Image: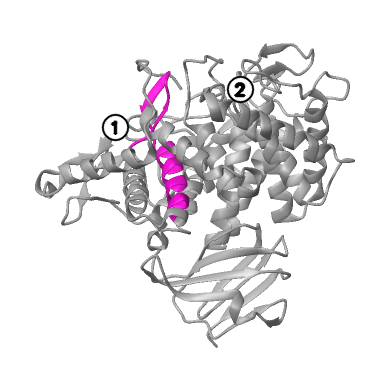
């Protein structure tokens, strides 16, 4: 993505002062409901205190956005009629096809991230086929044995024809594709995806170098056939960390090389970008430029720290610093008091996926801080991201979404796959985002393989035997079974959570099948 201007460098402020600034902005809009106007195609909704509210409910945002993917228009290719997401990365605001560089590696990763959350939330199995199409097309074009980078996917397609034949690729997106394979394997049990992820990991480990301040342990962009390094630096060494960490948690070791390499890469992240904030080299249509930082990698790094505090003893200070960096550099814009996040210095545009990503990290931070200011910061930004949903060219219950308040053309990442999953992540700490009159799994640290919702009863099966789930439900559970046995009362709580009624927390220590019932 490209911008109109590049901002000057900004100083980094402590998180506490940033939150005070947010409160000041909220105070400025108090009492302005009568002259609120519009954001994009929707009338602005404010509460009695002038705080921005979503223009519609989040449940509709999720379901109608997924409906567009399930009903995606097609374009002729050598394979027949291909859904647009197999061919191009974006389309027009009028819902018309545009031929653009495809970003199939990013599509694969973010589509699976959205799918595993969306399926758990809805039980809608019709959401699986579009994601399977993406993974299978990518898998069809892995590099041949004998290439310098063998058994890995090209992660972008400059010809945008549904054939992923480019020789260049980005190792971080290669790793993210591997993560997508592993999670889809957990969801479906199809071992071809596990095998493909192992092949990627073997090649990645063979190419990891020492790394330095100006050269990452894996390069940003390479020629898969010749091994030529096209671009030597990316701050996104989180991607191979995620891949190797997933394999380790599957019980795989590769004679210890997975853990040793993961730890080496993670230490580089902590030693360099976490300290110097050179968060650059992520987007497929960019080259490394140390003056062009982005919000994507620091926020995803913060997410990993919050999910895996054992990986960083100083994670609280680091997460606070990363939030402050992103808010101060990319979150200067306020919309009715809500922080709106821009993508990167060279594409300095407000985008809803990035605002939702930021909100999801702040919501998780709120779980630690219990500071109501953090809750309000996340809540307001989440409200803002609804205004890019369902543009005026949308039809029926299928949403054509703007990329954001400040960017028109819909992207399959920013408007859908790398947007919906962040809304769902926020629901675990802000459960009032989910409807009170329906039953939903809001979040799990496992992949939910199967779920069925019935009146007064929910059944689900997880991949991992240990984990936790958060649900918002319409009934008071009288019995919870775990693998056919009563789940001990100490392993679940039901009631009000963060001021929201009807929230159920479950902790599984050695069970995969859960039945929740009021009968």
In front of the other: 324 or 461: 324
- Above or below, 414 against 305 in this view is above
Q: Which residues are magenta?
A: 340-366
Residue 336 visible in image: no
Where residue 292 appears, x then y in whole percent? Answer: 47, 18
Q: Which mark is residue 234?
A: 2
User: Where does the C terminus fall, quadrant-wise?
Assistant: bottom right
Picture coordinates of residue 144, whole percent (x, y): 84, 24
Question: Would you identify the image quadrant in which residue 297 lies?
Answer: top right
Q: Secondary structure at mark 2?
A: loop
User: Which numbered disc flags the more N-terminal residue, 2 or 1?
Assistant: 2
Rendered location of residue 203, percent (x, y): 81, 28
Few, some or many residues within 10 Å of mark 1 (<14, 14–19, 20+)? some
Q: What residue sits 76% from the left and 21% below the top?
A: 209
SS of the residue at dot 1? loop
Identify whether 423 is placed above or below 302. Answer: below
Mark 2 is surrounded, within 10 Å at the Cα level, by few (under 14), some (14 to 19) or many (20 or more) other residues, namely many
Does 284 sit left or right of 165 as displayed? left
The image's colouring method is one colour
Of 416 and 284, nearer the camera is: 284
Please name the residue that numbered disc 1 is placed on. 333
Residue 101, placed above or below residue 482:
above
Asked whether residue 382 is in view, the answer is: yes
**Which residue is at a point 52% across and 42% down the rendered structure image?**
417
Along the line of sight, which residue is nearer the eye, 74 or 358?
Answer: 358
The quadrant in which residue 219 appears is top right
Residue 255, quarter of the rendered image? top right
Counting from the top left corner in percent of width and height, residue 120 is at: 57, 60
Q: Is residue 346 magenta?
A: yes
């Amino acid at each position: 993505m490209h911008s109109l201007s590049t901002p000057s460098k900004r100083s980094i402020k402590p998180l506490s002062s940033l939150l005070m600034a947010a409160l000041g902005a909220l105070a400025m809009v108090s009492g302005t409901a009568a002259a609120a106007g519009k954001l994009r195609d929707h009338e602005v909704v404010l509460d009695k205190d002038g705080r921005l509210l979503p223009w519609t409910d989040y449940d509709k945002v999720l379901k109608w956005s997924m409906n567009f993917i399930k009903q995606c228009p097609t374009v002729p290719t050598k394979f027949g009629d291909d859904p647009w997401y197999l061919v191009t990365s974006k389309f027009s605001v009028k819902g018309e096809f545009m031929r653009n560089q495809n970003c199939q590696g990013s599509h694969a990763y973010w589509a699976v991230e959205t799918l595993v959350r969306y399926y758990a939330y809805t039980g809608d199995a019709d959401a699986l086929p579009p994601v399977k199409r993406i993974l299978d097309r990518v898998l069809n074009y892995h590099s041949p044995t004998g290439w310098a980078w063998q058994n890995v996917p090209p992660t972008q397609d400059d010809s945008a024809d549904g054939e992923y034949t480019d020789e260049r690729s980005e190792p971080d997106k290669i790793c993210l594709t591997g993560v997508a394979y592993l999670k889809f394997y957990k969801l479906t049990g199809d071992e071809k995806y596990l095998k493909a992820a192992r092949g990627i990991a073997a090649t990645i480990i063979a190419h990891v170098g020492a790394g330095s301040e100006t050269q990452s342990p894996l390069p940003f962009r390479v020629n898969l056939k010749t091994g030529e390094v096209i671009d030597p630096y990316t701050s996104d060494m989180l991607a191979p960390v995620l891949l190797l960490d997933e394999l380790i948690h599957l019980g795989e070791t590769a004679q210890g090389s997975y853990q040793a390499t993961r730890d080496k890469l993670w230490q580089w992240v902590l030693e360099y970008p976490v300290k110097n904030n050179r968060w650059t080299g992520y987007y497929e249509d960019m080259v490394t430029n140390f003056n062009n930082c982005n919000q994507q990698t620091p926020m995803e790094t913060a997410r990993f720290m919050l999910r895996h505090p054992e990986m960083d003893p100083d994670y609280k200070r680091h997460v606070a610093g990363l939030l402050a960096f992103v808010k101060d550099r990319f979150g200067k814009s306020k919309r009715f008091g809500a922080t709106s996040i821009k993508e990167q210095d060279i594409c300095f545009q407000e985008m809803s996926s990035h605002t939702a990503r930021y909100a999801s990290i702040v919501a998780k931070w709120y779980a630690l801080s219990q500071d109501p200011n953090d809750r309000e910061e996340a809540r307001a930004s989440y409200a803002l991201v609804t205004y890019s949903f369902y543009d005026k060219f949308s039809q029926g219950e299928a949403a054509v979404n703007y990329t954001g308040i400040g960017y028109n053309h819909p992207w399959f990442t920013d408007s859908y796959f790398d947007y919906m999953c962040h809304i769902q992540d926020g629901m675990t700490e802000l459960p009032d985002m989910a409807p009170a009159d329906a039953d939903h799994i809001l979040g799990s640290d496992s992949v939910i393989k199967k779920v069925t919702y019935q009146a007064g009863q929910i059944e689900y099966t997880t991949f991992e035997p240990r984990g936790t789930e958060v649900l918002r439900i319409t009934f008071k559970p009288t019995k919870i079974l775990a693998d056919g046995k009563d789940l001990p009362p100490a392993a679940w709580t039901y009631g009000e959570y963060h001021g929201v009624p009807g929230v159920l927390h479950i902790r599984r220590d050695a069970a995969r099948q859960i039945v929740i019932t009021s009968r």
